Image (cartoon, rainbow, N blue to C red):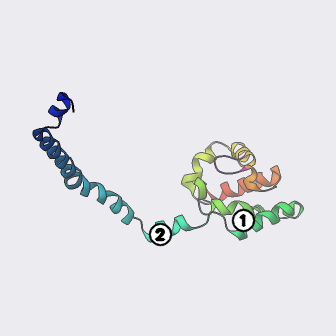
Amino acid sequence: MSESQAETFTPKNIIVLFGLLLAAVFIGEVLIGPHHDKAPMAAAHEDTSKDIAMRLTPVVTLEQVRANMTAAAGAGAAADKSPKELYQAVCAACHNTGAAGAPKFGDAAAWAPRIAQGIDTLVNAAINGIGAMPPRGGSQYSDEQMRSIVEYITSESK
């Protein structure tokens, strides 16, 4: 060992390093540790059964997918349906639950700023898709059918 290494590892220096290590462990475990560990636990216990059930609820059910496929396959049959029936077949999956940020059906506060943009803007967004909503809500509905659905939703959400 060289002379500079011998001076580095003196008993006095080793005791000082050991003392600093103990101080760091004390600060980390006693002063910081309990507060850091309790915060995530408190947040986890704040979830209510309702919150948990909401997160576990599927966004789309198999029945809704089948209804959407039926609506797409029978586009001619969809022409005979009322706007309410068209809405129930495709749009209700998200707009009844508010899935993916969709404004809920009948929620006047959520629809007011959208309605203020004008019916043509809403129809255009419904036809071309907006946010998480795919074009035509994932259906094969015509432009006229989409307009009738938008008019139905807005009339029920004022």
Which residue corresponds to the image point at 67% horizontal and 63% vertical from the top-left?
A: 93
Q: Quadrant of residue 154?
A: bottom right
Q: Is residue 106 above or below residue 125?
A: below
Residue 58: percent from the left, percent from the top? 61, 66
In space, the residues marked 1 and 2 are separated at their CA atoms by: 25 Å
Asked whether, in this view, residue 93 is left or right of residue 7, the answer is right
Return the residue nearer the eye: 106 or 138: 138
Question: Which numbered disc covers residue 50?
Answer: 2
Q: Say what amino acid the circle numbered 1 marks.
A: Gln
Which residue corresponds to the image point at 35% horizontal and 58% vertical from the top-left?
A: 40
Residue 76: percent from the left, percent from the top? 89, 61
Residue 130 shows up from this direction:
yes
- First to last magenta residue range: 129-134
Dot in front, 1 or 2: 2
* Circles 1 and 2: CB atoms closer than 8 Å: no
Residue 49: percent from the left, percent from the top? 45, 71
In the structure shown, which secondary structural element does the residue marked by tag 2 occupy?
helix
Asked whether, in this view, residue 52 is left or right of residue 114, the answer is left
Residue 34: percent from the left, percent from the top? 24, 58
Residue tagged by mark 1? Answer: 88
Return the residue nearer the eye: 54 or 144: 54
Q: First in sequence: mark 1 or mark 2? A: 2
